[in-house]
Image (spheres, rainbow, N blue to C red):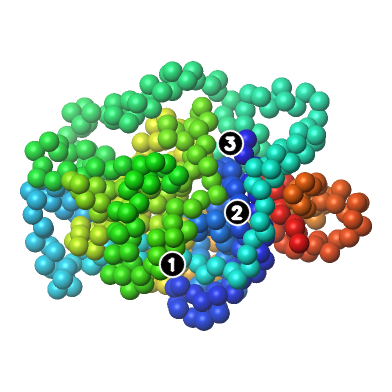
Amino acid sequence: MSVSIVQYFGSQLSKCGYCTGTNCSKSNGMHAYRLDCQDYQDLIDRGWRRCGNYCYKLKNKETCCPCYTIKCDALEFKLTKSNKRILRRMNRFLRDGKRDPVEQAARAGNDDDVTEGANAPASEPQPQMPDKSPAVINVEQAMSLAQAQKSKAKPAGAAQVLGAQSPTLGSNKSATAISNKPRKKAKQMRLERRQAKLGDTKEPPSQKAATQEKSLTDFLSEPSESNKHQLKLSLVHVYGEEFKRTLPDSYALYRKYQISIHNDPPKDRSAYQDHLQVSPMKNEKPDDGPEMGYGSFHQQYWLDDKLIAVGVIDILPGSVSSVYFFYDPDYSFLSLGTYGSLREIDFVQTIAATTPALKYYYMGFYIHSCPKMRYKGKLSASYLLCPETYVWILLTDVIRSKLDANKYQRLNDDAAARDVNEFLVEHLDEVMLLLDAKTCMKYKNYVQITGTESDRVEIIEYSELVGKVCAHRMLYVNMA
């Protein structure tokens, strides 16, 4: 089990990337030295989001543009007419090698499908980082200290009780809770994963009713042997050798995209890597997880031998979270932003065939007060996270009307509902602190030894934001 290590930075005030206002975006932030993948799943289920090693959570009641975490149930997803047009356009281009005539309509502003795909931002802007630098620590040493501290706290016989399940997942009340079914043998699981990868577990088209609509998989699995162009998707881990090999291609593409689409060229390759490669999560491969494991990846889109798009994603125990998506502006006529979303939904559906708990596709933030960011709400079976009770609410026209009336909404209509993972003051004693290179202890011991509670308010604020489970599971860096 990996131990998450974070340093809380408190409140942040910065320029807004949505309304471009100055000093009006209000958030809370923290630096993550290391994040267990389940901990990050729990954090995004409380409105947190990461950019590199920096994690932030908007103060929706106070900020200029409230941001609601949005997810799509990939197994309930339904294609729209617009989605089908984009998929057909891509298939025609791959088959015939010709640009669709609709591209001309897009240039004239007569095709909402294409112009939206070309102009809508693929992801929220990069957050402004705080001026404060995180403390320098030895991450591996800190993890060892925390693990030793937790081992001391285990009651007799606890190891035997927890041996059959992950302690991380076992205490979580989210959709990723472990079932009581017996674990499958590794060989059987590998076979099922291979079948899913090859498409063997999906119903052959010939067995479907003649009147049944084509599914997303049907569109993406059309015959390709005779195509003029071949589109290949390659999944690479951000710390893997394949990522290093293709880094010049991906950086050049990112630079071209930023200049053309956002008029915002990156400073250098290092800035690109800080934004879209660096991750506090390692590649975790539990027996009951997907074949590629959990962690941070780039899904590369190769048209013949040319890289034309990259989807930056986090694969977590309950979801695939989209971090960013960038593409070659020369191929905007293919609506690659939307096409990438459809591909990532298909990816979630494939994983869910062998890892049922992983069935959600997270799209980052839905910002209703920013019209250009409303496109994320067009995917069917999409849900918004209530910023007060942290339950998921189906995004309907009723919810949209409420957000039209007031940009901040509780979303959950049940006035009596409470956050089931709420952190209370009586939970403070169990928060784990890293005090220096050799000292890790619970808050209650820290107070007894030092006789001070000078950091009490800040630690409580942090704990309330991450929730009781993460507050007790993660290691809080409290170093001068």
Q: Is residue 413 visible?
A: no
Mark 1, residues whose alpha carbon is within 10 Å: few (<14), some, or many (≥20)?
few
Q: Say whether residue 259 is left or right of residue 331.
A: right
The residue tagged 2 is 32
Q: Quadrant of residue 213?
A: top left
Is mark 1 in CB contact (under 8 Å) with mark 3? Answer: no
Q: Residues within 10 Å of mark 3 (few under 14, many from 20)?
A: some
Alpha-carbon span between mark 3 and mark 2: 24 Å
Q: Residue at x 51, y 51 (%)?
A: 279
Rendered residue at 44%/53% (across/down): 277
Secondary structure of the residue carrying tag 1 is loop
| For residue 277, above or below residue 212 | below
Residue at x 35%, y 26% (from the top left corner):
194
Badge 3 is on which residue? 177
C-alpha span from label 1 to label 3: 32 Å
Sequence-wise, the earlier of marks 3 and 2 is 2
Q: How far across and how far down the image is residue 285, in percent?
A: 50, 33
* Residue 324 tag number: none
Q: Residues within 10 Å of mark 2 (few under 14, many from 20)?
A: many
Q: Nearer the viewer, mark 1 or mark 3?
A: 1
- Between 186 and 242, the one lying in front of the other is 242
Tell me whether the residue at label 2 lies in contact with that at label 1, contact meaning CB atoms closer than 8 angstroms.
no
Please state which of the two labelled residues, at mark 3 or mark 2, is closer to the viewer. 2
Mark closer to the observer (2, 1) = 2
365 vs 6, left or right, is left
